[in-house]
Amino acid sequence: MTDEQIPEFAPFWRNVAARRLCFPRCEACGRFHWYPLTRCPHCFAADIEWCAVEPRGTLYSWTVVRHAFAATFVDRLPYVVGLIEFPDAPGIRLVSEVRTASTDALWVSMPVRARFVDGSGAGELHFVPTTPNGRESHEDSDLCDSSIQ
Amino acid sequence: MTREIAIVGIGETPPVRRSGRSLRAMVVDAVLAALDDAGICPKEVDGLVTDAVIMPTEVPYDYLAAQLGASNCFAASGSMGGAGIVCAPQLAQHAIASGLANVVVCYFGVDWGTRAGGPYAFHDLYPAKRAFEKPYGFNAQPIYFALWARRYMHDYGLTERQLGALAVSHRQHALLNGRGQLRDSLTLDQYLNSRMIADPLRAADCCLITDGAGAFVMTAMDRARDCSKRPVKVLGTGFASAPVTGDSVFTQGSCLTAMPGAAEAARRAFASARLGPKDVDFAEIYDCFSISCLLQLEDTGLCRKGEAGCFIQDGGIAPGGPLPVNTHGGFLAYSYRLGIEHVTEAVRQLRHEAGRAQVPDAEIGLVTGLSMPDFGVLLLGR
C-alpha cells in the first residue's frame, strides 16, 4: 500500500491543496491526535473529523540542516526544519520547513505562520516567522493567506 | 518464577565502516567466538534470542541453528535493535527458569556501512514519516535529535561546550580501548570548530556507521560455574514502552526532553536487582547521539533532571570519573551495532578484562538499550 492509499493520511494534503491546515480530531471527545490513526487514541471512538485550525503557531523547536541525507536535498542546504505547535490544536506538533533569511534569529516559542503556495506535497506548504505584532516579516502578502473555512 | 543466570561468553567482529562480508557471516563469526569464549560446544545451544525487527529477516533462527548444529531450539524476539538486545537476558531468564532452554545465545549485527541508505533507509518502514516528514527533509536521525537537543538547551541551559565534553569523553575511552573505529584524539576546541550536521549537533555528536556483529551466551548460574571464564551475573532487567507509534515518537511526545520508557525501565531493573543508581560503578548508555546519552543519564536516575550537562563537563563520565560511561567509546567512537557491543563491553569490564579502559574495582554495571518508543535496562554484576 502506498502512502497515498492510506486512507487516514489523504485528507491532510487534500486540505493543504485547498489552502487549509487541518488535523484529525475526535468527534466524541474533541481531542486532536497526530499522526492520523483509525481510532481516537484518547477515547477509542471511530469518528474522526478533519478540523481546520488557524494556520499560525509557535516553534517548539527547530534545526538548521547543513548535511544532505538524500540527494534531493543537496541543492537546498542549509534549510530549516521546525516543529510547530498550534493554539487551536493542543497536544500535537507539525514538522514543516521554516523559510527565513536569518536562521540565527530563530527562537523557541517564536510565532510562525503558514504560507500556501502553488506546488505539490511539501511544495504547497511551509512556514515563515511572524513579527510579534502579527505582521509578516517577509514581503509575501501577494500569496494566499489562509483562513478557517 | 526466576532463576539466576549469567553471561558466560562474549564475541564480536572487529568494528569497521565497510566489512566486505555478509551480515550472516559476521553474525556466525560473533556467535562462534562467544561460544568459544564460554567453552561451550555450539551443539549445546538450545536457545536463540534477538530483536524482533531486524534479525528475524536478515539472520533467521533456522539459519543460525543450522550453522551451530543446534537442535530443539527455543527462539524468541523482543522489540527492535537496542531495547531487544538489552532485554534478551529477560527472555533467556524465563526460558531457562521454565526449562525451555539451557544455553541461550543473544546475537545481533548490522551492515549499515555497506547497505544502501544505511540507518536512514531503515526508518522508511514508518508510513507517516514517509508521508509527512521526508518531503521536508526531516529524513535522518541526526535531524530528529537536533530538535530534541535544541529544546533541551532552551529548557535546561545545556551548552555546546557541555555536549562537546560528552563527545570528548567518549573519544578518550575509545583511545584507551584501541579497537574501535575512531582512533584519533578529539579536543574540545576541535569539536567546537567542527562542522554542524543539524545544529546544534556536529559530526562528533552522531553515532558511527558500522558493519559488524556481536553475541553473548547465557546459562543458569550452576552451569555457568563450569565455563571457561568468570560468569557475569544478570542482576536485574527492565523493559518499558510508551503508547506512541514509531512514526510519532520523535515529535509528538508530551515533552522531547526525556526518553520515553527510560525512567520506568530503570525503575523496574533496579527493583528486580534490589539496587539503586548509587550502586552503579559504570554505565554503557545507548548513545545514538550525544543528546540521547545525556537524557538517559537523567532518566535512569544516574543524574538528576537538568544536571547531566554540568556532571559531564566536570568529568563525571570520563575515564577516571565517578561514573565512567561508554568505556569502549560508545556508538560515538567505538562502533554502532545498536547495543550488542554495550553488553559485551560491560561483561569485559566486570571480568576485569578491559585493559587500559578498565574501571578500577568494577562490580556493578548498567546497560541501556533504546528502540523508540521502547527502552531496556540491564544490570550486570561481578
Image (tube, coloured by chain):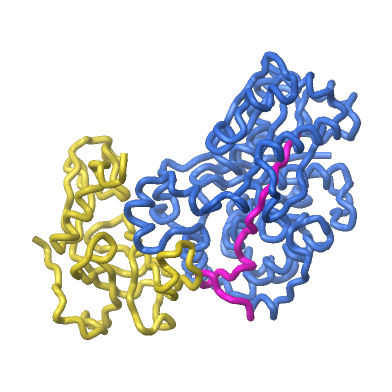
Q: Position of residue B330 (x, y in %)?
A: 70, 55
Chain B colour in the picture: blue
**What residue lies at 19% left-to-right and 60% top-to-bottom?**
A16
Frontmost residue, B180 versus A2: A2
Position of the C terminus of chain B, as image quadrant, is top right
**What residue lies at 72% left-to-right and 62% top-to-bottom?**
B170
Q: Quadrant of residue B214?
A: top right
Position of the N terminus of chain B, as image quadrant, is top right
Frontmost residue, A4 versus B53: A4
**What residue lies at 72% left-to-right and 46% top-to-bottom?**
B341
Residue B250 appears anywhere in the view = yes
Q: Is residue B251 above or below residue B150?
A: above
For this orientation, the residue located farthest to the left is A149
Residue B119 appears anywhere in the view = no
**What residue lies at 75% left-to-right and 33% top-to-bottom?**
B31
Q: Position of residue B12 (x, y in %)?
A: 76, 42
Frontmost residue, B172 versus A85: B172
Q: Is residue B306 above or below residue B126?
A: below
Q: Is residue B204 magenta?
A: yes
Which chain has been coloured yellow in this picture? A
Using residue A29 as the reference point, say whether residue B235 is left or right of it.
right
Magenta residue span: B193-216
| Number of marks in the rendered image | 0
For this orientation, the residue located farthest to the front is B20
Using residue A27 as the reference point, say whether residue B20 is left or right of it.
right
Q: Is residue B335 above or below residue A133?
A: above
Using residue B251 as the reference point, say whether residue A89 is left or right of it.
left
Q: Is residue B326 magenta?
A: no
Q: Position of residue B124 (x, y in %)?
A: 43, 48
Q: Position of residue A93 (x, y in %)?
A: 33, 58
